[in-house]
Image (cartoon, grey):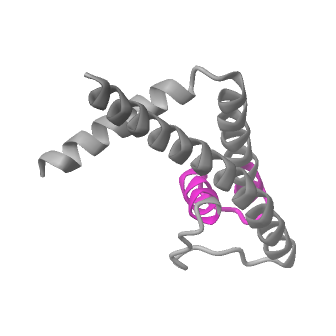
Amino acid sequence: MFSLLLSIKELFQSFKFIFKSKDTRALFALIIATLGIGTLFYTSVEKMSPLDALYLSFITLTTIGYGDLHPITAIGKIFTMCYATVGLGFMAMFISVIAKSFVYSAHNRKHKNTKE
């Protein structure tokens, strides 16, 4: 349990570190914009509530895909295929930045502790 709490603490420290970078902030803004575009599309074309549209956008981008919500129209299905393809790239980049920062900070702490 203690190691889980330490890992969570390190994860939040990694978030704090990576958001100092302009590139990471831009990538995060791109993901937020992508979620917004998906939400607007599903609200207007698929006639979903804003919360359902955001939920569908989020589960599509994160590849969770529970299957409880899905597009009904042909244009909605085509949009979702493109949206998932593009969004997956954005999410993969963001997750790799987080993982790289997490590993880098853990390596630095380990290296710092061996010097002392």
Based on the picture, tell me whether residue 97 belongs to the magenta stretch.
no
Q: Which residues are magenta?
A: 40-60
Q: Main secondary structure of the magenta part?
A: helix
In this picture, residue 1 sits left or right of residue 103: left
Q: Quadrant of residue 29?
A: top right
Front residue of 63/11: it is: 11
Q: Residue at x 29, y 35 (%)?
A: 9
Q: Residue at x 63, y 65 (%)?
A: 60
Rendering coords of residue 102 (x, y %): 45, 41
Rendering coords of residue 94 (x, y %): 63, 45
Q: Is residue 62 above or below residue 108?
A: below
In this picture, residue 96 sits left or right of residue 17: right
Q: Is residue 79 above or below residue 67?
A: above
Rendering coords of residue 44 (x, y %): 77, 55
Front residue of 78/40: it is: 78
In this picture, residue 46 sits left or right of residue 94: right
